[in-house]
Structure formats: C-alpha cells, structure tokens
Image (cartoon, rainbow, N blue to C red):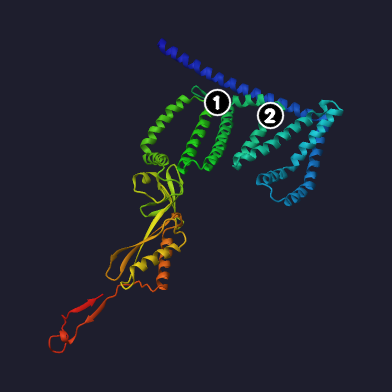
Amino acid sequence: MGPEETTLERSTETAAEGATQDTLDTSAEFAELGLSLFERAEVFMTSLFRPWNAYQIAIALALFVVAHLLRMWLGPKLVDWVRGKEGWPKWRLRLFVLSNQRLRPIFFVILIWLTVVALREYTWPSRSYLLTVIGNLATAWLFIIFATRLIGNSFIRTLVRYGAWAWVTLNIVGLLPEAEQVLDSAAVEVGDTRISVLLLLQAAVILGALFFGARFLSQTSAARIQKNEDISPSMRVLLVKFLQVLLFGAAFFIGLKSIGFDLTGLAVLSGAIGIGLGFGLQKVVSNLVSGIIILLDKSIKPGDVISLGKTFGWINSLGARYVSVVTRNGKEYLIPNEDLITGQVVNWSHSNDFVRLDIYFGTAYDDNPHDVRKLAIEAAKGVDRVLATRPAVCHIVGFGDSSVDYILRFWIKDPTGGLTNIRGNVYLALWDTFQENGISIPFPQREVRMLGDEMGDGDGMPDLGAKAAASD
C-alpha cells in the first residue's frame, strides 16, 4: 500500500469519526435538554403540593365553578336582552355572539384578577403567584380566541390558536428558552444547510403571518379600487391583479429572507423553471399575456356585451387565463384570452351602450306607404326599452313580388337584457297597430289552373303535355 492510499484511508477514518462524534454530541445535548425540562417539570409538580400552592389551585377551581354558574344564569338573560334590540349593525351582533359563547372564560378571567388584587392587598405576593400565572394563561387564551376569529379557514384557525397558546404558555412559565433549544437540536444537515424543527416552525409562523397580512391588504385595497368610479373596469381588474401578485410575492421573498434562506439558489432555480414553462406551457403563457393586453388596451371590460362566433352574451369577469361570458340562457362560457386577441370580436358596448336593431316587414300594395311608415314608428315608440331620445326610423327598401318591403330601425341602451325579446316585442306592436288601422301583411300565394279540352289532342282527352299557367 502506497503512502497516498494510506493518507486517504486515514482522512476517511478521521471524517467518519468526526461525523460520529458530532452525532453523539447532538444526541447528548438533546438528552440533556430533555432531562433538564423533565427535572423542572418534576420540581413544579412537587411544588403544587405545598400548602399555599394547593390553596391557590383550590381557589382557581372554585372561581371556575362560579364563572360557570354565572354563565348559566346570565347567558339566557343577555340573549333575551339582545333580541329586543333592533337595528344593531352586523359587526356588533357578531361580537355579541362570540362573547356570549365565551362567557365562562370571560367571567373566570375577571374573577381571578379580582382575587389576585385582593390577595396582594391583604397578604404576601408569593401567596398569589400561582393564581397570577393561571390568570395570565387564561387571559392569553381568551385574547387568542378573539384574535384568531379573523382567520376564515377553520383548520388554519385551530392550528394558529393552539400553536400561539403553546408559545404563550411556555413563555409565561419560563420554559421558552429550553423548548427552543430542544427544537433547535432536532435538526438535519443537507450540505451547508442546517434544517431544524425550530427553523421550520419559525418559517411557518413568519410566512403565515406575512401571507395573512398580504391577503388582508389585497382584499382591502381591492374593495377600495372597485368602488372608485374614476377608474375604468378593466383597469380596476388589472390593478387588483397586479397588487395581489406584488403583495404575495413580497410576502414570500421577505419571509424566506427573514429565516435566513439564501435567495441566490432560488433565482437560478426560478430561471430554469421559467425556461421550462416557456416551452411546455406556451398556451398558458399566451393566454396570460393576452389577458394582460386585454386589460391594458381596454378592448373589453366586465359588463360589455360581445359576440364571438356563435356565442353572444355579456362579460361576467376577466381572469388570468380566460374571460367568463354569460349568455341569455344562463350558460357561462370560459373563452381563452388568446381567442379574444386573435379572433374577430363584436363588442356591442365598447364605446357606449347604444345598440341599433333592424327588423324587416312588408305590407300590401294597396296600403299607403306614408301611413305605413308613420304607424311603424309609432308602434316602435310604444315598446319598453326602445329609446325615445334616438327616434326610430322606417324606410322602403324595395318592391317585392307580393309586398312593399320596409326596414324599421330603433335604438336600445341595455343589450344585456337581450336582443331577440325586444325584436319580438316590436313585431307584436307592429301586428297590433296594423290590425287596428287596416294595414294588411301579405303572404305569397300561387294559383294553378289546369287547361283541359281546348288544349287537348282533339279526341276529347286532355293532352299529357298540356301547359299549366301559374300566377302569384
């Protein structure tokens, strides 16, 4: 065996011994911390059997029973009193319901602090120390219950509630440093990165708080932006989307930075992911970019009435990938943004809400065309939704085989109310008006005459090749 091989073998053995020693040191440190916590817990449990500590526990139990009895007696009376109050705002009713459900801990906190004040006044502070700790724990629990009601998700609310109460409990009883050491000692090293249970908990708390703040700010800002009538609907949607991306992105990166995460590797990873997304999700990226273009050029906006192919309806919402279009029959079409950019879209309310509709009809040649035009205009004026500010007009468009043909043009301002129904109502108004004034609406008629003997072959039988004359 050469000297180089011997040196390599010794280095390997030294590294293995060092790693084993580090593992043993970590295990020993974890065991020592656990033993320290166990010893302190044992001392605390032993101290509970001292006379004044036992008295304080008995006083706390008695106060809890009194709080329970007060809740049973006063709770129904408060409910009856609130039922007689009319016109209360919703936030006040919700606060009362939440407080009524927590009457027992509220009474307990009030009673225990009154007891602590009285004991401190008439005896030594050490004889109310345990009651003070219990009062602090009960007050913290009550505050956490009210604070976590702001979280909408029930699972996250429960997780935050019990996690916060555990942290407050450890802090009040003075075991927080030891608990942090125990959690930090349970770690895994991946390369140069050390990931411990404490780091994971800190990351979850910090990121959760930042995301909650970003969500609250985005919802509040979005509500104010939507109420601003000076901003166009498409720009409102664009501002809301941009604000959401900005706030949640900032919360994510600030959270990672605050726990000591190196963002350099994340930048390289995000670049690689971006290239992969560019090739693999071309349609998704195309729809996303098309959605941004639609919001910027204001070609369509929520509430516009559009036609795209055979789809006719009004825009319900603008999304990052698609546009929601609701038709008159209640169907909701999710049209990709790319189709709205590359296809021909008819926007009935792009610059304004005025829409002109045309209907065609015909009358007999015996009717005076001047009277027909006047009657048609008057009939259109009497229909709801037909605008009087933009008068209807009627023109002759041709002399047909059976009738004089007309076109009636009128305006509406609410295309979202439908087009077929307003056309039908105008046709009914024309029918009623023409019936009242003796105007006839002709229909094609054909008369067929069979020519018999005079067109025959001389034997009294009609010729099979006889001609037939027809007239309309």
State the residue in front, 222 or 132: 222
* Quadrant showing the N terminus: top left
Give the amino acid type for the residue marked by disc 1 in the picture. Ser
Q: Position of residue 386 (x, y in %)?
A: 44, 59
Please identify the residue farthest to the front as the structure is shown.
370
Query: Viewed as shown, does residue 318 lie left or right of 442?
Result: right
* Quadrant showing the C terminus: bottom left
Does residue 141 appear in the picture of this structure? yes
State the residue in front, 319 or 28: 319
Q: Residue at x 30, y 68 (%)?
A: 404
Q: Position of residue 66 (x, y in %)?
A: 81, 41
Q: Residue at x 69, y 48 (%)?
A: 88
State the residue in front, 125 or 59: 125
State the residue in front, 292 or 52: 292
Residue 441, labelled with which disc? Answer: none
Q: Is disc 2 surrounded by few (<14), some (14 to 19) or many (20+) residues within 10 Å? A: some
Residue 258, labelled with which disc? Answer: 1
Query: Viewed as shown, does residue 465 lie left or right of 411?
Result: left
**Residue 315 versus residue 171 in the image, above or below:** below
Query: Viewed as shown, does residue 343 lie left or right of 206?
Result: left
Q: Residue at x 80, y 47 (%)?
A: 73
Q: Position of residue 11 (x, y in %)?
A: 47, 14
Discs 1/2, front: 1
**Residue 4 versus residue 352 in the image, above or below:** above
Does residue 424 appear in the picture of this structure? no
Dot 2: element: helix
| Residue for badge 2 | 170
Give the amino acid type for the residue marked by disc 2 in the picture. Leu
